[in-house]
Image (tube, rainbow, N blue to C red):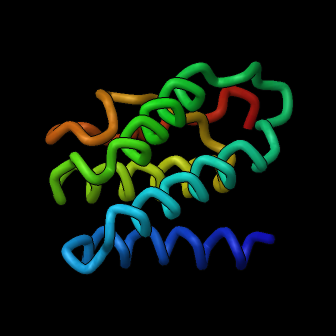
Amino acid sequence: MMTTVTSFVSELCRAANEVHHLTPLAARRLLERAVAVIHDMPEIKGVEANNTVQDATIALLKVAVSAPHRSEREIRSALLDAADIIRLRKSGRSVQRDSEPGEKTGHFSEKPNDLA
């Protein structure tokens, strides 16, 4: 599964770099797939559910649903945020949200897993 996850992170980054070629439907499907992947990833053992990830996935879904009304910058940001969440969860680190997906300054930061 890790190869599949890595490939999907690459797909999200590629789509973000070529966002001007994406249709709103394609952007929506990518973001919805990202949320599904995030939810399917196993929780970090011994760490309670990360509310930040839940909040971020809700925000990603909001961007997905409203993709036809979002700017390329907002969609690019959401795609990159989704890739960051997946990458950080894959590495076993918790995710700390600095702001909402789609915001100009929004990004995720790595927080070391206390149980590592």
Q: For the N terminus, which image quadrant?
A: bottom right
Q: Is residue 62 left or right of residue 23?
A: right
Q: Decide which of 84, 92 is in the foreground and name it.
A: 84
Q: Is residue 44 left or right of residue 7?
A: right
Image location (x, y in percent) of residue 89? 63, 47
* On screen, residue 9 above or below 35: below
* On screen, residue 98 above or below 105: above
Q: Residue at x 22, y 46 (%)?
A: 69
Q: Residue at x 26, y 42 (%)?
A: 102
Q: How many marks?
A: 0
Q: For the C terminus, which image quadrant?
A: top right
Image location (x, y in percent) of residue 10? 48, 76
Q: Quadrant of residue 5?
A: bottom right
Q: Decide which of 41, 32 is in the foreground and name it.
A: 32
Q: Residue at x 71, y 76 (%)?
A: 4
Q: Is residue 107 left or right of residue 56?
A: left
* On screen, residue 75 above or below 10: above
Q: Decide which of 41, 70 is in the foreground and name it.
A: 70
Image location (x, y in percent) of residue 22? 31, 74
Q: Residue at x 48, y 32 (%)?
A: 56
Image location (x, y in percent) of residue 101? 33, 38
* On screen, residue 46 above or below 12: above
Q: Decide which of 65, 93 is in the foreground and name it.
A: 65
Q: Is residue 14 left or right of residue 111?
A: left
